[in-house]
Image (cartoon, rainbow, N blue to C red):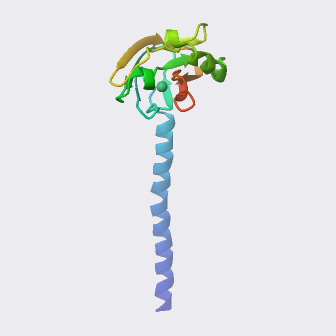
């Protein structure tokens, strides 16, 4: 009896090995797929009443024109829960910029200066705005909402590759 058990165990071991392999392969291809996620030229970004964007990373191709739509899917008005999308040049100090932006109420929190690549208007619940701009050169940029107190939660990376 014993001599049958040993080959059986060995067989089980082999089977397990084979079972393990495809899983690992799947994992690898999934990771590859993620890192090769197709850059988008049409970007839809949603924001809501809980001070959140639905993306913290936007990937776009270099040298293309980007059409970006920001939606505010909430119900609150823009005076209490206003959101915008502001894309900053790569060398901007985000903290410093956001501080100045928060006091630029008259211009809907867009401060003077040349630090911005593109921005939408300030939206209240139910509003949308679409902007069209050329993707900046390859690199990693920051986007944020400049409404006072929002940027620490409402920011992300805009990656051009
Ligand atoms: Cu906001």
Compared across the picture, whether 65 is left or right of 87 comes to: left
Quadrant in which residue 115 is drawn: top right
Quadrant in which residue 83 is drawn: top left
Residue drawn at the location 57% of the way across and 19% of the way down: 102
- State the quadrant of the C terminus: top right
Pinpoint residue 160: horizontal percent, then vertical percent: 54, 21
Pinpoint residue 88: horizontal percent, then vertical percent: 57, 17
Compared across the picture, whether 92 is left or right of 135 comes to: right
Residue furthest to the bottom in view is: 1
Reply above or below: 28 against 64.
below
Pinpoint residue 138: horizontal percent, then vertical percent: 58, 19
Residue drawn at the location 44% of the way across and 17% of the way down: 122
Q: Is residue 109 visible?
A: yes
Reply above or below: 3 against 110.
below
Residues 104 and 161: in front is 104
Pinpoint residue 101: horizontal percent, then vertical percent: 58, 16
Residue drawn at the location 51% of the way across and 23% of the way down: 145
């Amino acid at each position: 009896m014993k001599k049958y058990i040993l080959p059986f165990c060995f067989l089980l071991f082999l089977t397990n090995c084979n079972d393990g392999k495809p899983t690992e392969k799947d994992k690898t291809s999934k990771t590859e797929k993620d890192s090769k996620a197709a850059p988008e030229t049409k970007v839809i970004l949603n924001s809501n009443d809980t001070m959140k964007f639905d993306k913290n990373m936007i990937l776009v191709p270099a040298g293309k024109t980007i059409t970006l739509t920001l939606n505010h899917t909430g119900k609150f008005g823009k005076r209490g829960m206003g959101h915008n999308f502001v894309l900053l040049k790569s060398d901007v100090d985000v903290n410093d910029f956001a501080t100045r932006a928060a006091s630029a109420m008259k211009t809907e929190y867009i401060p003077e200066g040349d630090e911005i690549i593109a921005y939408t208007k300030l939206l209240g619940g139910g509003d949308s705005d679409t902007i069209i701009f050329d993707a900046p050169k390859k690199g990693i940029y920051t986007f944020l909402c400049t409404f006072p107190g929002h940027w620490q939660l409402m920011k992300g990376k805009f990656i051009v590759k």
